[in-house]
Amino acid sequence: MEATGRSVLRSAIHGQRRFVAGAAALAAGHQGCEALVPVIIGVVIDTAVSSGSLPRLLTWLGILAVIFLVLSLAYRFAERNAQRAGEQAAHELRLKLTRRVLDPHGGADGLPGALVNIATGDVKRVGDMVAAVPYAFAALTALTVSSVVLLTSSIPLGLLILLGTPPVLWLTHLAGRPLERRSHHEQERAAEASGVAADLVAGLRVLKGIGAERAAVQRYRRTSRRSLNAAVRAARAHGLHNGAVMAVTGVFLALIALIGAHLALAGSITVGELVAAVGLAQFLPTPFHMITYVSSEHARARASAERVAEVLEAGPAVTPGAARLPAEPVGELHFAGVSHGPLRAVELRVEPGELLGVACDDPAAAKALLELVCRDADPEQGRVMVDGVPIDGLALSELRRAVLVAEHDADLFEVSVLDNVVVDAARSDAASRAIQAATVDLVAETLPDGLHTVLAERGSSLSGGQRQRVALARALAADPPVLVLHDPTTAVDPVTEAAIASGIAELRKSRTTVVVTTSPTLLAAADRVVFVRDGAIAGCGSHSDLASDPDYRAVVFS
């Protein structure tokens, strides 16, 4: 079923229907008892004035005490159930978003900070709306009980509430539309600010390295200012909405009080009924406040639900197939006339066990190659094949089993260095060789607990070169049939890079390896180098053979 804002809200409420229904019943009981309090007080007064019977008076006082006990307990447990429904609905919706964002088929793109904002702020608003639903039933119950009570004592007052409530509710709905629009814009700007902030924090070291802190601050300041302006406009709309609703309900309540006073003066109702009418007039702002609250939460939640639905409904970037590879893939990789982004009619075959270097004059071309191999996208023309099987026909689990693409900016986890490398305890020997090939053993010598040193978040306790070496060791330890490395040594010194180049060549000599890089050290260690210029293959041979090409020299040796 297509995800829309309305369906997201409906699903959130339906998923918590047991708690919502329980909270609605208890809240309705609370408000019903609240509405009965002035009525019972009126009966007590009439009993005391007209009959003077002490037993009857005590009986009605006892009934009043019971009503107070019931309404107190009902409110307590109604609030508990409502909050549980709201928190649980938000949690389940957050899990849905997380599963969609992490779906291996892709498609849910956006800045990480923006997605986090949707999964926190927007989801919280949906949860708040779910928690508010029971109070809509409570408000309607209070209005119904009040109108029925007033109808029994005065038909004009009862009809006034019954006939006046629907227009009041309609006007509150109209007042909520501007708030919904402003709230949607506010959340969009907040998500943009969160995304920019997360992006800048992630690239802080790079910004400091190129001296771009001032430009980064100015960019965030502009984004933050737009977010602030949107928040102010949304707050203004929220205040106008509440003010408009309170004005409408205030006029309605004043009308009820005036008619009630006129009837009392005319002798149409008793003293007790007058007290009950006045008490109900004083009580009626409570259900109308509830209606204002629910209307406001609904308007804000609808805007947030639309943003949640956009992520949930985002189509997959790729459609998986069902084909399977042999139990032990050979490791042949073939680009057959591939055109994608800047790439034009690329024809390239990587033989099993070959160490291939790929040098691109355009970083976008390198990125396009990686997207195709890991199937973040499908080519516009041509096909990419593994062992003769087109990867668009493979199940993604099969592709991941055969091909591993190690991105340039791989993340590390808040565990030990060794745990970051060893992805499978059964491959401890492979991990040990990978640690040596990536020279992580030399990194460990500088750490307080060696390989057992626990890293900070995202590996920030290591230098850039050390993080690269740990990430490279993890990729090598996985020992896939086809390994694609993207600039694995850009932050490593030349001596260490030479050791890593020979380590990769030695460790992967029976496995297919593609290194997408412009590093002359890594390219020199490759069995063969392919030079991609202007999106097409412009040369193929050894590193020393291609070094005579001035364009190749400009890219690799600059």
Image: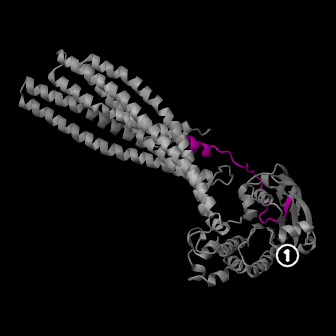
Dot 1 amino acid type: Ala
The residue that appears at 10% across and 31% down in the rendered structure is 57
**In the rendered image of this protein, does residue 405 appear above or below residue 77?**
below
Give, as a single range, the part of the protein colored magenta.
305-334
Residue 293 is one of the magenta-drawn residues: no
The residue that appears at 56% across and 70% down in the rendered structure is 414
Across and down, in percent, residue 99 comes to 59, 52
**In the rendered image of this protein, does residue 294 appear above or below residue 516?**
above
Across and down, in percent, residue 186 comes to 53, 44
Across and down, in percent, residue 215 comes to 63, 59
Mark 1: give few (<14), some (14-19) or many (20+) Cα within 10 Å. some
The kind of secondary structure element at disc 1 is helix
Q: Quadrant of residue 410?
A: bottom right
For this view, does 553 lie left or right of residue 300? right
- Give the residue pinned by disc 1: 524
Residue in the foreground of this view, choosing between 242 and 313 = 242
Across and down, in percent, residue 156 comes to 28, 16
**In the rendered image of this protein, does residue 311 appear above or below residue 267?**
below
The residue that appears at 59% across and 71% down in the rendered structure is 460
For this view, does 532 lie left or right of residue 258? right
Residue in the foreground of this view, choosing between 192 and 523 = 192
Q: Residue furthest bottom?
A: 445
Q: Quadrant of residue 359?
A: bottom right
Residue 475 seen anywhere in this rendered image of the structure: yes
**In the rendered image of this protein, does residue 308 appear above or below residue 207?**
above
The residue that appears at 46% across and 42% down in the rendered structure is 235
Figure quadrant of the C terminus: bottom right
Q: How is the image coloured?
A: one colour
Residue in the foreground of this view, choosing between 343 and 432 = 343
| Predominant secondary structure, magenta span | loop
